[in-house]
Image (cartoon, rainbow, N blue to C red):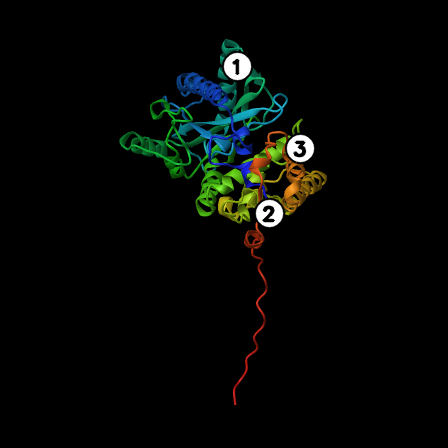
Amino acid sequence: MLKLNKLLYLSTDRQVFSDEIEPTPDQRDELAQAKNDIRDHLRSGIAAATVSLLGMPRQVEPRFRTQGSWSYKTCVQPPYMPPQEMDWDFGVYLPVEVWEEKGPPHAMAKAYFLLVEGLLKKLCEEKKWALLPGKATCIRVKIASWGHIDVPLYAAPAEQFAQIRERAMNKSWSSSVHDSAALSESVEFGELPQQLWEDLDCVMLATRSGEWIPSDPEHVSRWFNDRVEQHSEQLRRICRYAKAWRDHRWPNGGGPTSVAIMIAIAQKFIPQPGRDDIAFENSMRLFSEAIKTDIREAGIDQGKEAFNRLSPQEREDVSSKAALCAAAIEQARNRADYQKQLAIADMRDHLGDRIPTDEELVDTETAVAAILAVAPKLVVPPVVRATSAG
């Protein structure tokens, strides 16, 4: 049997799969700079219109937050750019003083959406970017052939923002999960530290149709980061491998969403210390079953939202491809020592040519190690009937 872990992850300067799928520093910088340009443009533009267009009693400034894969460090670089793209999810949060029974004033949602879209249209003209219309729950700004910024629009009670901003300005914050320096964030310009967002307990999302819907991305982020803390950073890496697998198998788009992948894998993840190959194989086998379901999680929203948006036919297709990936990894691991190149080819068939071809990265596994690497299976305990002595 073979150990394929070093093809995926190696804690040295040598480039392997986990390094190849990482966004480059230049890509990160360009997306972060575009995010900051959007932040600065919207900060003043929204504030100037809060009274005249949004009907608020006084002028307020919006707050901003990097969300999604850049926030919890699961962003990967797709192999085919274009047509595939990297995205940065950048939420705009409006502090609202008037709060009705089911959220902010109903008419404000449409006005808010149109205001921000108009402001971004002007910025796109200045920057030679493209504003892509039609998204129902965000505004998309394409900054390059390979990347875009998605801008969802939220509202939350103003008094909660006042409390957390005071905390943010009075304390130095740091986080191993959400790196504000890496994301080029600034409290001074309305971007609050990650730890403080959970203090918002009533967040509403504005839609293009003019509706407010409950939607707090912090719930997903907090749940996932708790799972990483529980299972180690290996979970985060496995989710990134699965996203890279998705991008390789669906070069023109499609397949499971990143959130569906992340939640489904995290729900039943079993760590395999030092063996990303086995952890990935097991996760893809479990994912092939999970993707047939709606994928709900009580720890996020009491299981209310179905995170799997695929049709029944699409679910079967994804399930089949995930099962094939797991089988290919198992086949690769079970090859003989002289078949290392065939094992590498097995991996590249399902993950692409960013898997290195160097045989030195493939080790031979001892029989004892192979037995220890098998995940324990749960068995039903035997029934012990009551007896009496004598």
Disc number at residue 121?
1
Q: Is residue 89 above or below residue 319?
A: above
In the rendered image, the residue lying farthest to the front is 338
Locate residue 187: give its quadrant.
top left
Residue 338 locus on image (x, y percent): 65, 41
Check disc 1 and report its element: helix, strand or loop: helix
Locate residue 84: give its quadrant.
top right
The amino acid at mark 1 is Lys
Q: Residue at x 57, y 67 (%)?
A: 381
Q: Earlier in the sequence, mark 2 or mark 1?
A: 1
The amino acid at mark 3 is Arg
Whether residue 204 can be seen here: yes
Residue 108 locus on image (x, y percent): 48, 26
Whether residue 329 can be seen here: no
Q: Is residue 344 above or below residue 185?
A: below
Say whether residue 278 is left or right of residue 43: right
**Residue indicated by mark 3:** 249
Q: Is residue 353 above or below residue 141?
A: below
Check disc 2 and report its element: helix, strand or loop: helix
**Residue indicated by mark 2:** 282
Label 3 crowd (10 A; few <14 / some 14-19 / many >=20): some
Residue 44 locus on image (x, y percent): 40, 17
Closer mark to the observer between disc 2 and disc 1: 2
Contact, CB < 8 Å: mark 3 with mark 2? no
Q: Residue at x 55, y 49 (%)?
A: 268
